[in-house]
Image (cartoon, grey):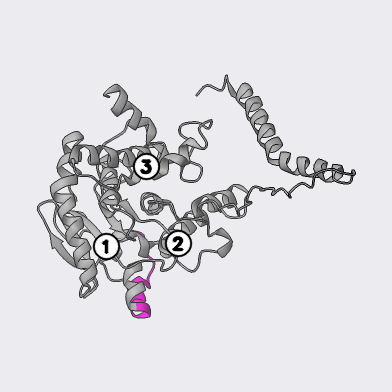
Amino acid sequence: MSHTHFAPRFRLAWVAWAIGFGLLLWPAAASAHTGDASAWPGAPVSSPSTVFLPMISRQRLPPTADLIERARERGEINAETALIYKVFAVFGDARLPPRLRGDDRDVLDSNAVAEATQRFETLTPATRQTVVPFLIPPVYAGSWYDQRVHGASATAATAQPTDHISDRCNEVAQNLLIPLETDHFVVWFPPNDNSFWQRALAISTNLETRIYPILTDLLRVPLSDAGLGCNPSDDRLDVYMVYDPLPGRESALAMVSTYPGKGCKAAPTYMQVLKQGSSETNTVAHEFMHMLQYAYNPAAGCYDSWWMESTANWAIDYFETMDGQPGAQSEQRYAKSYLESALLWLDDTTGIREYGAYLWPFYLSHYTGS
């Protein structure tokens, strides 16, 4: 990224600010001058002028993940604690310190669970014990969701330390989630809840008949999870819908996780839908793109976060364009997060900027045909 024109832009910004501020104060200055003249004999009486001052609003907090990372950089917490707190943030766990709770209203998803799953074998026993309920699919006894729904009675399943995540995927919890099956997906949702049934049916239909054919035709099919531990179905892709993990607070809408021991590339995945956003179809299109990304085997390590998120958000635009049905185009709301900090590097991930970086693949696809 070139910074050649930064100084002229900076000077122009100050000139524009000075002009604006001068125009803002002009009515006050004119009023003051007229007031002095009104003391003269025979001078006309001037009407009072109104000065409109700019509104000062409270600045939004950074996202929770940013606050946690800053605390780690300051040495207040170590890397493992930071990872634990990022996992807590996704699920609204009360053990997250309030001072590290940020503004997550525009956070679409999180890679904290995927990262913890990939790093699990290198974590300390205490950290493994803390995070493992969040790293198994929510349908299993002892999972974070089982504990959230069934309370203390579900804790016994996680009472003993474990060296492997799969050790905890022993039993599907009864009456916790039920499956809705299609050719390529199994969508799990809470029973006896008509609103969830309707949402599950919509997600299942849109994934199967619209999102899957469009994005797999562009790229490839996700990797099969047949025969893997922590997989309650067969080789079809599992999507878990759960009750709001953080009622009354904003947090991630959904996320994709890899299976235990599969690393961060060429890995089968599963999806969790945590909240209902403005467009659930767009949300699962974004997440399904992550499932496709994990199916590839990049040459150098894992994919960068900015590229994963920017292309997943661009996938919403591609899906909406190819689908031919007017939709929410929910990716557009994130453009501002990139444009308001356009002088930063393309791969900067401050705040939610990586979602707005979809403008780069958007440009490539719409204006170069790439």
Element type at mark 3: helix
Within 10 Å of disc 1 (Cα), the crowding (few <14, some 14-19, many 20+) is many
**Which mark is first along the chain, 2 or 3?**
2
| Separation of marks 1 and 3 at Cα, in angstroms | 25 Å
Q: Which residue does the numbered mark 3 point to in the structure image?
A: 332
> What is the x, y in percent for residue 214?
17, 40
Q: Is 9 or 91 nearer to us in this picture?
A: 9
> What is the x, y in percent for residue 310?
37, 38
> What is the x, y in percent for residue 281?
25, 51
Q: Is 191 or 24 nearer to us in this picture?
A: 24
Contact, mark 1 vs mark 3 (Cβ under 8 Å)? no
Q: Which residue does the numbered mark 1 point to in the structure image?
A: 241
**Which mark is first along the chain, 3 or 1?**
1
Tag nearer the camera, 2 or 1: 1
The outermost residue toward the top is 4
- To which quarter of the image does residue 128 belong? bottom left
Q: Which residue does the numbered mark 2 point to in the structure image?
A: 88
**Amino acid type, residue under disc 1 in the picture:** Met
Contact, mark 3 vs mark 2 (Cβ under 8 Å)? no
**Amino acid type, residue under disc 2 in the picture:** Phe
Report if residue 159 lies within the magenta region: yes
Residue 96 shows up from this direction: yes
Question: Which residues make up the magenta segment?
Answer: 151-164
- To which quarter of the image does residue 358 belong? top left
| Separation of marks 3 and 2 at Cα, in angstroms | 29 Å
| Separation of marks 2 and 1 at Cα, in angstroms | 18 Å
The outermost residue toward the bottom is 153
